[in-house]
Amino acid sequence: MKEKVYLDTTIPSYFFDNRKSQQQLIEITKDWWNNMSDQYDIFISDAVLEELCNGEYPLKKEIIKWTSAIQALPNFDDLSSVVDYYIANNVMPNTLIGDAVHLAFSSYYKIDYLLTWNCNHLANANKKKHIQIINTRLGLPTPLIITPLELFKEK
């Protein structure tokens, strides 16, 4: 059985990014996708598609088409209450509902890895313990929240 990976919005957006200032992250993202993604079961949520549709991206059509081919997890009944609990307990600022939604989906569905380039509010060592405490209170497991750089396997 393959391990499960949830992609937040940063992964498809970096896959199609062309900014010179982000070149290293773009290359790592593409390398991981092209060489490692088939070793995992990959998931997104409607929140990813919504963020991509509402965002400003130079290759928006390509990003949405690429992302639409990835299996989307269904919404679950307690989604809004989990997100509200994250916000109320300062896991995420109330201006970053999307980050809380990605964490809620990956936690609720027992995803092994939440893959992101968001190192401010998700893949941040200073937040991991707080996230684990809040998820424990909610009775939810906590995925490993990491960047693509941390999810390469030895060949």
Image: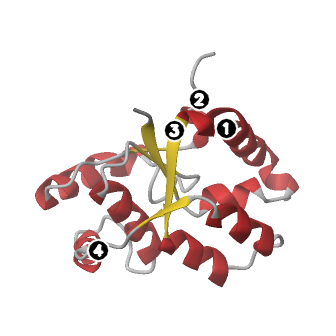
- Across and down, in percent, residue 98 comes to 46, 73
**Residue lying at 73% horizontally and 39% vertically, measured from the top left:** 34
In front of the other: label 4 or label 3?
Answer: 3
> Looking at the rendering, which quadrant does residue 11 occupy?
bottom right
In the drawing, what numbered circle is on residue 32?
Answer: 1
Report how many numbered discs are placed on residues in the image. Answer: 4
Return the x and y of residue 37 as percentages of the image width and height.
61, 39
Q: Which mark is residue 40?
A: 3
* Residue at the spot of label 4: 79
Q: Is residue 58 left or right of residue 91?
A: right
Q: Which dot marks residue 51?
A: none
Q: Secondary structure at mark 4?
A: helix
Q: Nearer the viewer, residue 83 or 87?
A: 83
Q: Toward which corner of the image does residue 91 lie, by quadrant?
A: bottom left
Taking the spot 58% from the left edge, 58% from the top edge, the residue there is 70
Look at 28% across and 59% down and name the residue there: 108
Q: CA distance from mark 2 to mark 1?
A: 7 Å
Q: Earlier in the sequence, mark 4 or mark 3?
A: 3
For marks 4 and 3, give the CA distance: 24 Å
- Look at mark 2 in the image and give the residue it sits on: 152
Is label 2 in contact with label 1 (beta carbons under 8 Å)?
A: yes
